[in-house]
Amino acid sequence: MKVHNVVQMLQNTVLKNPDKPAMLWKNQGTYESLTYDNLWKRIQNFANGLLYLGVKPNDKVAIISNSNFMWGISDFALASIQSVSVPIYPTIPTEQVAYILDNTDIKYAIVENEEQFKKVKDSGVQLEKIIMMFSSQSSEHLPFTEVEELGKKHQNADWETLWKDLGRDQLLTIMNTSGTTGKPKGVMLTHGNILSNIEGIQFWVIELLPEDISLSYLPLSHIFERLAGHYLPLSIGVTIGYAENINTIPDDLQEIRPTVLTSVPHLFEKVFTQIMDQINNGSPVKKRIFDWAVEVGKEKYNYYLQSNVDDYLSQSYLPKNLYRKWKIADKLVYQTIKDRLGGRLRGAVSGGGTLNKEIAKFFWSLDIPLMEGYGLTETSPIISCNPMLRAKVGTVGKVLPNLELKIADDGEILVQGPSITQGYYNDQEETEKSFEGKWFKTGDVGELDEEGYLKIIDRKKRLLILSTGMNVAPAPIESKINESIFIAQTLILGDNQKYVTALINLDYETLIPWAQKQGINTKNKEALSKDPLVQKLINDDIVELTKEFTNYAKPKRVTLISDEWSVDTGELTPKLSLKTNIIKKQYEQEIKEMYKKNETKAEAI
C-alpha cells in the first residue's frame, strides 16, 4: 500500500525498526547516535515547538546549514506541520541568500551557526524568527534545543492530524537550482514527487537493506543527496553516518565504514587520482601487479555485462580460470583499495554530474560496483540509473519504470511522470518555457543506445558551435582531460570561434611533489603554472588523453590557471560543477589571448 506523504513513510520505518540507529555523527571526537524511535520523538517535539512559535501550514521556512542530524529533524518537522522547507546552500554569499529569502517569501529560518545567522541578518530580509542549531547567547535567535523543549511542554493535539491529512499533491519543499548560468530558480516539489522517485528507484540500483550504513557528506540542500542520502535510506531503515566535513572524508570512511555510498563524480575522480599517483610512484613490481589485477577486473566486468540473469544468480558466469585469477587479484590488490574506503562497500552511486567512463570502469575492475545515474532538481531528481545487474559504464542507465522519456528532434531529453516538478515558485514565465505540453524539457542533449541505455552528451546550452560550423560537446572532453592526475578541473571553450581552447585548473596536491622532484621552485603557484616543464607536462597529458577525439574537438590552446577553483571563491557550485559564466568573465583576458595568438606558434598543442 502506497504512503501518502514522507512523514508517513518515516513513521512506517520507525514502527519496523524503533531501536535501530537512524543517524550517526561525531561530537567532539566521539560518535553519537539517534535511534529511529528517538528521531521520531525529536521530530514531534520540534514540530510542536514550531507550532507554538506560530509557524503555520504553507509558511516557507529556510534551512541554512551543512548536513547533520538537526537538518533531518527540521526537514520532517516542517513537513509534518504542512510548512514548506526551503533549503539554502550554506556556502553561498549573502546576496544570493537575500535573493532566495525574498523570492520564496521566507517567514522563518533555521540556521546552523553564527556565520549563517549573519548572512540572514545582513540580507536585510525581515523574518518572524530565526532558530540556530549550534547556538550562542543572543536575544536575536532561538536555540534549536529550546524549540524542542517548548514543543515537549506544549504538545499540540492537532499535530498528528496535520501530517496524516497530507496528500501527495501537497507542496513539500522548494529546492533552489545551483545557478550555474544565472539566478537560482525555486523548484517546487511535492510529497508525491519525492515518493514516486523513491518507488521508481527501489531495487533498481543497489537494494538497500536495514542493515546498511551510508555516508552522507554532500549538502542536503542539493536534491541528489536529499533523495539518495536522506529520504531513500530513511524509508528503508538504513543508518546514515554524517561526515564531519568534506576534508575528513578519508577518516570518516574508515570510522563509519559504509556499505553504500552516494557521491558526485569528484570524489571518485579524487580516489582514482590518489591511487594512480601512488602506483606511479611505487616500485615497478607493484605497478605490474596492479596493472595485471586491473586487467583481470576488466575481463570479469566484460563477462558480467554479457551474462544472463540465470548465470549471474548461480554465480556461474565466470570461467574457472578467470575466477581463480580474480581471487588472487582480490587478495593482492582489490581488498587493499576497498579497505581505504572502509572495507565494507558493496556498491556506490554517482550522480550530479558526468562520470568519466574510464574511471567508472576502473572501479568496476577493482570489484567496486559503481552505478551512474542522471537527473535534475526538477525531476526529484532521478530520471535514469544503471541497475545493479548489467550496469553499463559510459551510460546513465535505463529510465525509471514510472517515467517516460523521449529524445526531441534536436537531441534534447524530454521526460514526463509523477516525479516531475509542477514548476518554479513565483516564475510562471520560466515554468511555461520549461514544458512542451506535459513533457519537461531537461536542457540536456542525449541519446538512447540499442539496449535502451541513456547517454548524456552535454547541456544543450553548452554545446559549442565553432565558426567553421562544427558542433563540439565540451563535457566529454573535460571529463577525459580531468583523468590527468595533475589536473583538477577543465573548462572547454570555442563557441563562435575557429578552434577549441581550454582553461586548466591545476591539482597542486599531485603537481607540487612532481615539480619538487624536477627541481622546480614550488613556493609561487603562478610561477609554477608558467614553468616550461609544467606546461609541457600538462600539454603532453592533454594530447594523450584527447587523441580519440576528432581533430576539431581537441583544444588548440591551453591556459594553466594558478588559482585554485572552489565553492568559496565562487567558481564551483556546491555540487562542484563549474560556474561557466563566472569563470569566463573572471578569465576574460586570458581567453582573448588564446584566440589572439597565431596558430602556427609553438604554444599550440
Image (cartoon, rainbow, N blue to C red):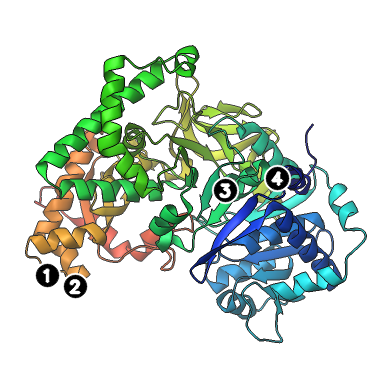
Q: Earlier in the sequence, mark 4 or mark 3?
A: 4
Separation (CA) of disc 4 from disc 3 = 18 Å
**Residue at 56% across / 42% down in the picture?**
212
Left-right relation of 228 to 284: right
Q: Quadrant of residue 358?
A: top left
Q: Is residue 589 above or below residue 410?
A: below
Mark 1 and 2 residues: CB-CB less than 8 Å, in contact? yes
Indicate which label's residue lies in the foreground, 1 or 3.
3
Residue 169 in percent (x, y) is at: 79, 43
Where does label 3 land, which residue? 229
In the drawing, what numbered circle is on residue 521? 1
Separation (CA) of disc 1 from disc 2 = 7 Å
Residue 60 in percent (x, y) is at: 75, 62
Left-right relation of 104 to 260: right
Q: Quadrant of residue 47?
A: bottom right
Mark 2 and 3 residues: CB-CB less than 8 Å, in contact? no
**Mark 1 Cα shell of 10 Å, populated few (<14), some (14-19), many (≥20):** few
Question: In the displayed image of the protein, which residue is found farthest to the front?
Answer: 19
Separation (CA) of disc 1 from disc 3 = 43 Å
Indicate which label's residue lies in the foreground, 2 or 4.
4
Q: How many marks?
A: 4
Separation (CA) of disc 4 from disc 1 = 58 Å
**Mark 2 Cα shell of 10 Å, populated few (<14), some (14-19), many (≥20):** few
* SS for callout 1: loop
Q: Is residue 131 above or below residue 284?
A: below
Residue type beneath disc 1 = Asn
Left-right relation of 482 to 313: left
Q: 322 or 420: which is nearer to us? A: 322
In the drawing, what numbered circle is on residue 17? 4
**Residue at 16% across / 40% down in the picture?**
287
